Image: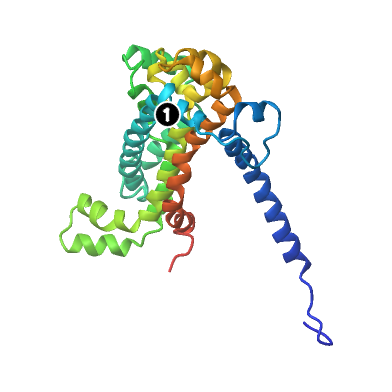
Amino acid sequence: MARNGIKKINFFAIFNYTFLAVTCLICVLPFVNLLAVSFSGNSAVAAGKVVFLPVDFTLSSYEFALFGGKFTRALMVSLTRVVLGVGINIVLMVITAYPLSKPKSKVWGRNIYMCFFVITMLISGGMIPTYLVVSSLGLKDSIWALILPGALPVYNMIILMNFFRGIPEALEEAAVIDGATPIQVLVKILLPILKPALATVGLFCIVAHWNDWFSGMIYMNDINKYPLQTYLQSMLVNFEDLMRQSDTNIQVILSQINARTGRAAQLFLGALPVIMIYPFLQKYFTKGLVLGSVKG
């Protein structure tokens, strides 16, 4: 409370805003530096002149990324994986989470199924058995090797199951009285209500598919079938070799970029799709995290 016309200083608020501002800068500044390096000339980068603003501005690194190497092909593989993988993930999560959200009196063996899923979430079969299964099914060097082993993310399914539990049972009972079948109740009543929840777990699945590089490394023998993150990991290790394998004139490329500027451009392009899609899901993501926390 103010005394003698002097307002009381909220030191906690000052500390809180200062801490958050410093944390944001720590997260953003490396990304700004990466962007500046990608737009800078190779000589300026080699001399250490680039910090947060481009020096000797050029688009050569992006021209090589989009037209010279295998970046575009790897990007298309990752986009195909995200579209197919997330679609399969959401369908399997919905048809699994919906019945498991019911009490055991309505679903026979519910606890047995839940124990099975929890065990698979906590204890995996291991990399070698998984690799042998994928190989024996003939999935190697195909997009399905990147999708089917993780077709049902159990952790996200349990999150979605809790969202189902937060919906009042009166809605389903009213729909059943009106003659709706269980499928109609799920598709026409529950799923429209669960848009924030689906956006939340969908975003988790998108990020998981997009950031996964190890699956492509062990299941793909052909570099032309690498997803984007696997290609970027290979590029970070041996960028010069990938430049020599490109379809463009290597002498022209070498005179305009170096390994650091080329890596920076491709890393920025690799992160750009997720950066672009996140703002559209932000409102659903925030709402979905708190959905079901308050019940009437």
Q: Is residue 3 left or right of residue 105?
A: right
In the rendering, at what x and y percent does residue 237 appear?
57, 18
Q: Nearer the viewer, residue 85 or 96?
A: 85
The foreground one among 153 and 71 is 71
* Count of numbered circles in the view: 1
Q: Image quadrant for the C terminus?
A: bottom left
Residue 16 in the image: state x and y as whole percent: 71, 60
Amino acid type, label 1: Leu
Colour option used = rainbow
- Residue 22 position within the rendered picture, expressed as x and y whole percent measured from the top left: 71, 51
Identify the residue under disc 1: 66
Q: Is residue 12 above or below residue 87?
A: below
The residue lying furthest to the bottom in this view is: 4
Q: Quadrant of the N terminus?
A: bottom right
Q: Judge left or right: residue 216 versus residue 259.
A: left
Is residue 281 visible to the viewer in this orientation of the structure? Answer: yes
| Residue at left offset 53%, top offset 32% | 265
**46 versus 174 height, above or below:** above
Query: Residue at 65% across / 44% down in the picture?
Result: 29
Question: Which of the pair 80/181 is nearer the observer?
Answer: 80
The answer to whether 177 appears left or right of 115 in the picture is left
Q: Is residue 92 above or below residue 142?
A: below
Which residue appears farthest toward the right when viewing the image? 4
Label 1 Cα crowd, 10 Å radius (few <14 / some 14-19 / many 20+): some
